[in-house]
Image (spheres, grey):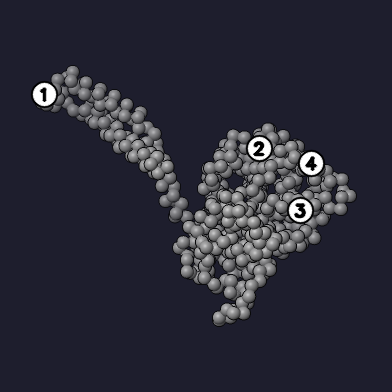
């Protein structure tokens, strides 16, 4: 493999040299044709016929060489373009916890709330000096290195039920990525990590550490009980949603239910938050589907939270299968339950139990029957990948996801759910709020629909006047979960 890469590099370098020589020959031929006088040729002992032959030979040689090296020239141009874009991107700072309201709140309070919610217990009696509580020990201890990452993932042929992580080989990608990200912060305090590292990585690392410490739990999902506790308030909401027939209202439900986030907006669990839409592309999206643009196409939903939000996603998918004529619905789940509410495959059965309820409502029973039917027929595909757990921008997705999900010819629409997926969609940076979303997601050629309740500061596509009005009336409007967006980019 190394030899092939070296050969390819040498070939590209030779092609590039030929490309520059080509350009030089063209310049020389133009100079000879228009700036060198007949007398000058004669002074060199070259008659008119030979001068013409030299000029024609230079042009032919440059054309032939240019044709041979055209791919190398294109690659050089692409590399220059990529470098320039990267340079411009570096000028837009990444978010860290000291410069962003949501990130600061996370480090100051959200981490501790979720530590307590996890039920994590360990013995601190022998620790010197003894911390005031378990969280203080956890937050102040030295940053764990890649040995933690090796331990959390089962080894080959591992059979212990005490491990919460899956055994799929591609989890090695997570270990490798997290190890590289940890390298600059070894032997540093976690408080240093949280303040200096890119926030999206520190956030993942913190919750991932909880999984590590709870790996001796026989339950693969340490948040299972926490998830179940939210279900007590869902009955009326499920009943209303099961009877909803309007696409716009279903889309709103997908946004409103995104407010129920067990790792952050716990205050919304017992009440239905009717999000005020800051971006409302419902009519734009309806016009798109009315043109049969999804007929016999596949739709991919990158899901976010379990419970009522997952139920809303399932009902939206059923609507698209039955009313919009889509071919297949793909639901993309997380492998690891990192952020409390994260949907993993086992949550689907819980969702269907919630929909069925006591079994007396025929509409709700029919939803469950239809979902199971389409799943058995292979028209609803539930798939999971560790990539959806990673703090990596979607523009750096593996080829399989970039090609088969985002840009496949069979894909008619990609739906991104929730706040974290939005941050990964555009990158977790300090964007100007009036920048266009479509300018930041050009790596996705297919239509994109964002359904999101606002719970962090990253947001594009809002005009400055609207933003200023919201800032004045509701200073924390980007982080409370009371506002939302239905944002559609048609991919043209």
Question: Is the residue 176 above or below the residue 366 in the image?
Answer: below
**Which quarter shows the C terminus?**
top right
Q: Are marks 2 and 1 in contact (CB under 8 Å)?
A: no
Residue 400 spot, x, y in % from top left? 56, 42
User: Can you identify the residue that label 3 sits on?
Assistant: 350
User: Can you identify the residue that label 4 sits on?
Assistant: 370
Mark 2 or mark 4: whose residue is earlier in sequence: 2
Q: Nearer the viewer, residue 95 or 211?
A: 211
The quarter of the displayed image where residue 107 is located:
bottom right
User: Can you identify the residue that label 2 sits on?
Assistant: 298
Mark 4 or mark 3: whose residue is earlier in sequence: 3
The quarter of the displayed image where residue 154 is located:
bottom right
User: Can you identify the residue that label 1 sits on?
Assistant: 45
Identified at 59% across, 69% down, the residue is 108
Question: Is the residue 396 above or below the residue 152 in the image?
Answer: above
How far apart are the alpha carbons under marks 4 and 3?
Answer: 16 Å
């Amino acid at each position: 493999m190394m030899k092939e890469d070296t050969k390819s590099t040498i070939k590209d370098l030779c092609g590039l040299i030929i490309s520059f020589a080509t350009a030089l020959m063209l310049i020389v031929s133009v100079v000879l044709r228009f700036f060198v006088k007949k007398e000058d040729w004669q002074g060199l002992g070259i008659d008119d016929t030979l001068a013409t032959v030299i000029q024609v030979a230079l042009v032919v040689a440059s054309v032939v060489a240019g044709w041979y090296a055209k791919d190398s020239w294109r690659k050089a141009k692409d590399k220059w373009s990529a470098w320039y874009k990267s340079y411009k991107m570096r000028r837009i700072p990444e978010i860290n916890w000291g410069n962003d309201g949501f990130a600061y709140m996370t480090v100051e309070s959200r981490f501790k709330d979720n530590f307590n919610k996890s039920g994590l217990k360990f013995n601190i009696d022998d620790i010197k000096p003894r911390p005031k509580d378990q969280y203080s020990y956890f937050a102040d201890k030295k940053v764990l290195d890649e040995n933690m990452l090796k331990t959390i993932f089962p080894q080959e042929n591992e059979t212990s039920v005490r491990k919460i992580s899956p055994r799929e080989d591609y989890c090695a990608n997570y270990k490798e990525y997290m190890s590289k990200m940890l390298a600059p912060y070894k032997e540093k305090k976690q408080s240093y990590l949280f303040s200096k590292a890119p926030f999206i990585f520190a956030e993942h690392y913190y919750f991932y550490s909880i999984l590590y410490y709870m790996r001796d739990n026989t339950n693969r999902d340490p948040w299972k009980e926490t998830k179940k506790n939210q279900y007590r308030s869902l009955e009326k909401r499920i009943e209303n949603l099961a009877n909803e027939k309007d696409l716009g209202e279903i889309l709103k439900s997908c946004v409103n239910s995104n407010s129920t986030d067990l790792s952050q907006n716990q205050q919304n669990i017992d009440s239905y938050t009717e999000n005020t839409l800051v971006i409302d592309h419902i009519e734009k999206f309806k016009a798109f589907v009315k043109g049969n643009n999804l007929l016999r196409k596949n739709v991919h939903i990158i899901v976010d939270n379990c419970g009522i939000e997952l139920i809303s996603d399932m009902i939206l998918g059923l609507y698209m299968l039955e009313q919009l004529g889509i071919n297949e619905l793909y639901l993309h789940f997380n492998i690891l339950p990192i952020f409390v509410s994260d949907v993993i495959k086992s949550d689907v059965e819980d969702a269907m139990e919630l929909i069925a309820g006591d079994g007396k409502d025929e509409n709700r029973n029919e939803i469950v029957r239809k979902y199971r039917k389409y799943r058995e027929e292979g028209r609803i595909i539930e798939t999971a990948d560790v990539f959806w757990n990673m703090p990596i921008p979607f523009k750096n997705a593996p080829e399989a996801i970039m090609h088969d999900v985002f840009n496949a010819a069979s894909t008619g629409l990609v739906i991104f759910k929730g706040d974290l997926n939005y941050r990964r969609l555009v990158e977790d940076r300090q964007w100007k709020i009036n920048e266009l979303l479509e300018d930041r997601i050009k790596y996705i050629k297919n239509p994109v629909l964002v359904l999101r309740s606002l719970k962090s500061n990253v947001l594009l596509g809002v005009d400055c006047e609207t933003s200023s009005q919201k800032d004045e009336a509701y200073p924390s409007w980007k982080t409370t979960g009371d506002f939302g967006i239905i944002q559609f980019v048609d991919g043209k």
